[in-house]
Amino acid sequence: MPTDPRGLRADAPLLDAWLRFQEEAPTPFTIPGHKHRLDLVGDVIAGDVPYFAGLDTMKLERGVLADAEQRAAALWGADHCRFSVGGSTHANQAIALSVGRPGDTVVVARTLHRSMLLGLVLAGLEPEWVVPDTDPTTGMPGVVTAAAVASALRRAPHAVAVFIGHPSYVGTLGDVAAIAMVAHGHGTHGIPLVVDQAWGAHFGFHPGLPDHAISLGADAMVTSAHKGLPAWSQAALVLARGERIDRARLEAGVEATATTSPSGAILASMDAARALLAREGEQLLGDVMAAVAAARRRLAQVEDLIVLDGDDVDPLRIVLLLARAGVDGNLVEHDLLAAGLPVELADRDTVIAVVSIADTAETIARLTECLVESVSARRGEQRPMISGAWSPWPQRGMSPREAFFARHEQVDLAAARGRVSAELIAPYPPGIPVLAPGEVVTDEVLDALSCARAAGRRIAYAADPSGESVRVAVPRTTGGGRDDLP
């Protein structure tokens, strides 16, 4: 029988409902179709409780989800919260649908996850891109600055919102409060700042961590409970405060893009993770932060190995840069996999390990020693880092929505130069697009794709998985003629 080892159910209504369902063991004549029989396909469906006619009645008479969301809103200091079982992808796209109308312009950090860029397609929004600088020493993407956002707003004075990410995928930090001031000072009444904080669910819950975006002035924030907190995969929250985000539109955006059969297990795990964070977050985070700090010190002792560290880096991120040591990160990954230690990202020049409050000093120390051994054994001649593999400066050719639905043709990469992309292509991880719908295929884009492949990253989401061709928009004919392609 499922247990509640830390006694969280009294403060977690969805967790309590999930446990009660196991304890009562009903015989449901509702979905899901497995009817909780483990003798058919095995334990893979264990714990799968629906939200409708599971955690709550089919008519939602208990109100457990609304209760849990209100508790989360209170913990993060927001006015409104919605749980998502579709990850931050769903939450980002719901917000995109809530901030404007088709044709409106938004200032968007170009290093945001693909989900937000495709949210522009869904909502018909026009981007005014803002691209963070790349650190010339490490080759890592930095963060969007308040000055860059102010410059973008001068170029797009009618923008209706600002979208940024914080922290970056590699854990670098920026000044969210300063950007909020810029957004709120724009125009007559200010415009909302939306922060994709998918990688920062732990922010704000220990004095040694950055504050979370809502406390720093953001009007809306998306965060992934399944990244930094002990929740099921796909668990995410969208939080909003104040009057700049239309609550009814946000509700409509969430419902328009959500499944009508949400997983009760994911919802309950999110509620439990929230309760744990509220009760024990500071202690758990303090322990793991100390372990990461020790790991960074140990790794920094390895000759020529660069370890991202300092006040401008998330204390729960382990990011190693390998070019100076002449080590191929893909080979390091092989060593780690052989030791049962998969990591978030490994390419030729970089290894990134994600740490959460579920890690311990022992697991982090084991990872650290394996990294030290592998890097030491695979050392080679120093080389320059591959540059340009994160996100090139975009050149706009048409709107994202128009390009996504345009008539198109598949052409070789070399022949695509100067054409407008009809698709999104992103090295994965991290899922930051090199090319998005509506952007011109430039030499910089081609170089970035080449760099990503050379580094050993998977090229994702392209119609041609080999990455040797790209789908481009067919120019509209003039004089009322028809396009050549069907």
Image: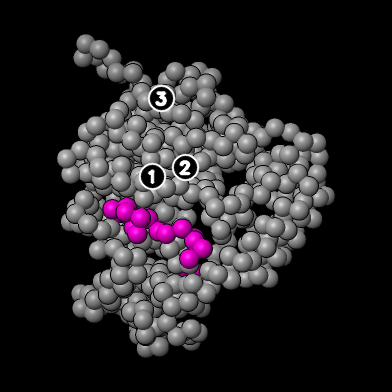
Alpha carbons under labels 2 and 1: distance apart: 9 Å
Residue under numbered circle 1: 164
Q: Which of marks 3 and 1 is nearer the N terminus?
A: 1
Q: Is residue 227 magenta?
A: yes
Compared across the picture, whether 61 is left or right of 437 comes to: left
Q: Does the magenta stretch include residue 224?
A: yes
Mark 3 vs 1: CB contact within 8 A: no
Amino acid under disc 1: Ile
Q: Bounds of the magenta span?
A: 207-231
At 78% from the left and 47% from the top, the residue drawn is 303
Residue under numbered circle 3: 395
Mark 2 vs 1: CB contact within 8 A: yes
Q: Earlier in the sequence, mark 3 or mark 2?
A: 2
Amino acid under disc 3: Gln
Compared across the picture, whether 379 is left or right of 404 comes to: right
Alpha carbons under labels 3 and 2: distance apart: 20 Å
Q: In which quarter of the image is the C terminus?
A: top left
Report x, y in % for residue 262: 34, 65
Is 278 drawn above or below residue 136 in the view shown?
Answer: below
